[in-house]
Amino acid sequence: MSSRPDDSPRRAAYEILLRVDAGSFSDLVLDTVLRRSSLDARDRGLVTELVYGVLRLRGRIDFALEQFCTQQLKRLQPEVLRLLRLGAYQLLELDRVPAHAAVNSTVELARELELDQATGFINGILRSLERGKAEIDWPQPENIRRYLQHVCSMPVWLSKEVMRLLPNTEARAFGEALALAAPQTLRVNTLKTTREKYLAELEYADFQAHACDFTPEGIIIDQRAEARLPGDEEGLYQVQDEASILIGHLLDVQPGQNILDCCAAPGGKTTHIAALTENQAGIVALDKHAQRIELIEQGAVRLGCHKITAKEWDLTEPPAFLEEQSFDRVLLDAPCSGLGVLRRNPESRWNKSAVNVRELAQLQQEILFQVAPLVKPGGKLLYSVCSFALLETDEIIKDFLAAHPQFALDDLREQTDPEWSELFTEQGTLRSYPHLHGGMDAFFAARFVRK
């Protein structure tokens, strides 16, 4: 990473996209670059907007570019295509950026990157796009497959998955929601404050925010102030989507219980369980990676959570150090494709495939089978994923119940707030969608009770 991004938000965005194309995670690279940068708050916001916007809407951007480019995009030099996408995103999506600034800054960036031979080509394509963008013949919603691919920016395999899951009207609305930026959602740490008090602190600090629709701890930030969120060092909040907050409630935890959180890092749900039990439950948190165990422990200290024991363990192997039938509650928030959080990890649209989903479904089943023996008679096991793929959700549940007659599916509608009824399927499982449920991520959860 050169020093240039310190004074050029578009250069910073370009280099972040370069590293994402090479296999890095956008959120981690973005956080690293911004933490080291001297950019002011406005330019930091532009970097974030450009990176996530280009990744999230790459399919839409490419469709527009193809209308004005005489060459196939896949034949272009990768550096040139990356620049075209940056410029095109500004022209198509950012009204506050003047067209001449979007074009000229992209051409200037090409010169900085020593792509002088491509400046004329880039300038011509972007100026043609600016003149002709109102005339682009976008696919109409009636052609749902092309609409999902070219307007909602979904690769072919993903659009097929959505069409299998939902009828056309719902599929369109879901695709449109996934093409939007995700809200910034917080879970108020009830071990230290209340939602009402924290909302008041946000207002005092010039943030605009409102309470989430479903969870009693959730807050959505509508407009940020220039300052940091209040209460960060004091542990008054945890960044966590409302769908993820729901999972802790669906586990139905009580003080005094023995609770296992599998695949627990970075620990948002673990610390929520501690808050729900008022630090009066023993919690074992497992994760495969040692460095992620540190994240759980650091989060527990920051949020004031006690009685959490974090341990490194790969749950594709039996956890012999844990006694069978010893836990009142077991949470498996399993490793998954992350299709339900595409707004937050937009590169997943382009670096995953149907093959990855099948491989992850096998892993989910393997881990679920490993942890099932740990549940006490009468205890509950909650399986959740931030995915909507049928292979990772309904199919996992069907196979698990067929292989484990000692477990029954526990209807989530029977022991939850009646106002949550719209979140649940006819089988009593959770399926949340951003276009239906207050903008929350797309999650799935099923709860089993051991007979």
Image (tube, rainbow, N blue to C red):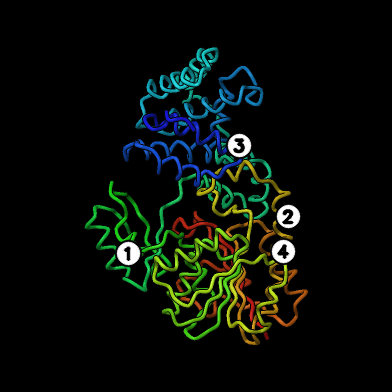
Q: Which residue is mark 1?
A: 234
Query: What residue sits 50% from the left and 74% below the top?
Result: 308
Query: In the rendered structure, which disc, 1 or 2, sits on the residue that comes first in sequence?
Result: 1
Tell me the tag on residue 359: 2
The residue at which mark 3 appears reads as 22
Give the x, y percent position of residue 236. Answer: 34, 65
Earlier in the chain: of badge 2 and badge 4, it is: 2
Instruction: State the CA–CA distance, disc 3 to disc 4.
Output: 33 Å
Rounded to the nearest angstrom, the CA distance separating label 2 from label 3 is 22 Å
Q: Which of the two marks, 1 or 4, is nearer to us in this view?
A: 1
Q: What amino acid does circle 3 point to?
A: Ala
Marks 1/4: CA distance?
Answer: 42 Å
Identified by mark 4, the residue type is: Glu
- Location of the C terminus (image quadrant): bottom right
- For disc 2, the neighbor class at 10 Å (few under 14, some 14 to 19, many from 20) is some
Nearer the N terminus, badge 3 or badge 1? 3
Mark 3 and 1 residues: CB-CB less than 8 Å, in contact?
Answer: no
